[in-house]
Image (cartoon, grey):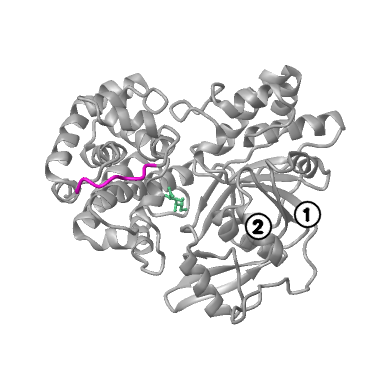
Amino acid sequence: MEAGLPDSVTPSGDPRPEVGIVHLGLGAFARAFIMPWLAEAGGDWGVIGVSLRSPDVRDALAPQGCVYHAVEMTPDGPEPRPIEQVRDVLVAPEDPEAVLAAMTDPAVRIVSLTVTEKGYCHDPATGKLNSDHPDIAHDIVNAIPRSAPGYLVRALERRRKTGTRPFTVLSCDNLPHNGALTRSVLIDLAHRIDPELARWIEAEVACPATMVDRIVPATTEDDIAEVARLTGTHDAAPVLHEPFRQWVIEDAFPAGRPALDRVGVQMVGDVAPFEAMKLRMLNGSHSSIAYLGYLAGHEHVSEAVADPAIADFVRTFWSQVIPTLETPEGEDLSAYADALMERFANPAIRHRTWQIAMDGSQKLPQRLLGTLRDALDAGRKTDALLLPLAAWIRYVSGTDEAGAPIDVRDPLADRLREAANADDPVGSVLAIRDVFDADMAARIADPLREVHAALVRDGARASAAARSD
Ligand code: CS2
């Protein structure tokens, strides 16, 4: 270690939990949300984290005994807390056999996932497995998989063969009906491998639905330096998060579960109303702020909502979302909206609009298109729902309002760029069936063309101001 740098964070030496969970996708969100909550719940639910692609998280965590800081950014300042829940990190492409072995261990009773929307290899418009996905095509014919669904199905296949009870699959991604979606993707993939396996999964494997919520921006080099100053130790993998958190889980764990209900997690019969509230209100407005805010020149969410044009628009947006929702038990939707605005305005959370703008093709169906369909069906106003969609089409064209290039990250980036630069950008983007079904495309084409034309002419900020009540 270079002179002058603090020593690395190390485990406290206190007993650590035995492994009971394998977690696929050990990104910032999992480290700031799932791991602290599991640590509080106690019991032998230690975690083997799996990176499906890059070794970065393992390279950062392994030398420090898999301990890291979760730093709560409170109004009174940052509060770092060491988290010791992760016992090991595996990198799937380096050692797929080790990952499958961990997932086949009878002590592992849950496999949880935060692999982002695109990690499910589904078709966003229908929620069904995308069998043309290259990783899925590979996983159908290879016992050593590449995709998250592939690892789950191949590990379940091994458990079935050895007479080991299946694990419960816990999706913690922002997808609609994430439990049912995961289940359908797994059964479909298994069916293409071995119909008997598909039937066994259908009968034996639980995939409870969840709603997860905590804002956790990607960690930056500045954050790492700040955590070193705060704690006096070097931590290569800290996570900075807001104080708020909410986890609602369908209580369906035939193989057992951590005592999460004792530490504030809501274990319920039906997650759907919570999930719709969160996806449509929080994530829907987040994506709106991302596209409009980025185009209006705002780097972070907190700066975007400090701009009255954007903040007023977001309130109008919520007023068009709320009538499409059923109020979940114990919630008040207008209080929820007020609390969201406060969370977004937190200047200690440096959440880039560019980060949220990523993968729009995978996010917008559940964040915006369902809302739009319900509002259209009910004959309600939709102009504030169309503007973010127009802003997305403008964004994926790859050039901002000042003519500078935009680094668009999306699995469909090339197709989107081409469509958004065609003579009829709206018609061309709406023709992408992975995202829009034909009925939705036909219903919104004309009003969306109008909103998009005004956005291109007047700019994002003026368009947001013009669409606010
Ligand atoms: C965000 C979410 O990046 C995004 O798309 O909208 O990650 C959001 O911060 C979380 O869902 C909050 O719970």
Residue that mark 2 sits on:
59
Residue that mark 1 sits on:
19
How packed is label 2: few (under 14 Cα within 10 Å), some, or many (20 or more)? Answer: some
Q: Nearer the viewer, residue 433 or 171?
A: 433
Q: Residue at x 59, y 58 (%)?
A: 31
Give the residue type at disc 1.
Val
Locate residue 259 relative to residue 57 in the image: left or right: right
Chief SS of the magenta region: loop
Q: Quadrant of the N terminus?
A: bottom right
Q: Choose top left, top right, bottom left or bottom right for residue 342.
A: bottom left
Q: Residue at x 23, y 42 (%)?
A: 384
The mark lying in front, picked from 1 and 2, is 2
Q: Nearer the viewer, residue 91 or 33?
A: 91
Residue 469, position as x, y percentages in the image: 16, 50
Outermost residue toward the front in this view: 2
Locate residue 381 relative to residue 157 in the image: left or right: left
In magenta, the rendered stretch is: 402-408
Mark 1: C-beta under 8 Å from nearest atom of ligand 1: no
Give the residue type at disc 2.
Asp
Residue 432, position as x, y percentages in the image: 36, 24
Q: Secondary structure at mark 2?
A: helix
Q: Secondary structure at mark 1?
A: strand
Q: Residue at x 50, y 61 (%)?
A: 219
Q: How many marks?
A: 2
Residue 430: mark in rendering: none
Rendered position, 436 above or below 356: above
The answer to whether residue 338 is seen in the rendering is no
Q: Is residue 35 magenta?
A: no
